[in-house]
Image (tube, grey):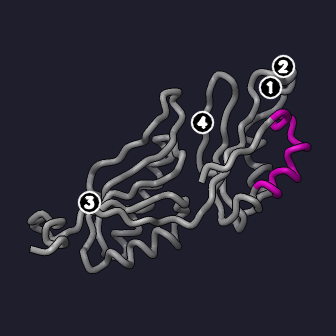
Amino acid sequence: MGILDKLLRKNARNELAVTVALNARYQPIDRSAYVELTERFLKEKGWGRLGGGEGTMLSPEGVPVACDFDILISPDKLEDVTAALDKVFFVPKGSRLVIGDEERPIGQQEGLALHLNGTDLPREVYQNNDINATIEKLEAHLGEERGRFLSFWQHAQGAALYFYGPSYADMKAALEEVIPDLPLCEKSRIEQIA
């Protein structure tokens, strides 16, 4: 019995069980939206369906650090699914497909976290500025070709905004151009996350 046969585990539908492990800092709601898009894509192509399991891994501080979900695909579509995840979806570097004991690296996008200071700015800055408007301005300046805002994490000291795109350096340079014009971004810091 070959490895592929073992992985199929006598699935009556002859489907290959695959875990998509994303090196993405998605909140559970953002992960669920991503999973729904993937499910729709798989069904439209006739390549497979969701497998049922999904989750978000959190650090001890509650920061989302990674997420995963299960899909069931036609074994002959594994290469197509792998290519589609890399090209159609914003899969960050460091992600992988897990098929039984085998892991396949996927992902070409880089990640950037913009950490906003939620405690050290004048009170009127927080009162007079809307975080959603700030995110819209950051996204507009960044442009979809350089990256997208895909999730966030809010905590007692502020918030982290998560952007993914082809180049961390390009995203960082673009955001640094507009950050001085956005009061909520004062005293912020940028970190590469993928």
Viewer-side label of 3, 2: 3
Instruction: Name the image quarter holding the C terminus.
Output: bottom right
The boundaries of the magenta stretch are 172-187
Secondary element under disc 3, as helix, strand or loop, is loop
Circles 1 and 2: CB atoms closer than 8 Å: yes
Task: Report, in whole angstroms, how far the alpha carbon at label 3 lies from the one at label 1.
Answer: 49 Å
Circles 3 and 1: CB atoms closer than 8 Å: no
Label 4: which residue?
153
Type of the residue with mark 4:
Trp
Viewer-side label of 2, 4: 4
- Queried whether the magenta region covers residue 174, the answer comes back as yes
**In the rendering, which numbered label is found on residue 123?**
2
Type of the residue with mark 1:
Tyr
The earlier-in-sequence mark between 3 and 4 is: 3
Task: Report, in whole angstroms, how far the alpha carbon at label 3 lies from the one at label 4.
Answer: 32 Å
Label 1: which residue?
126
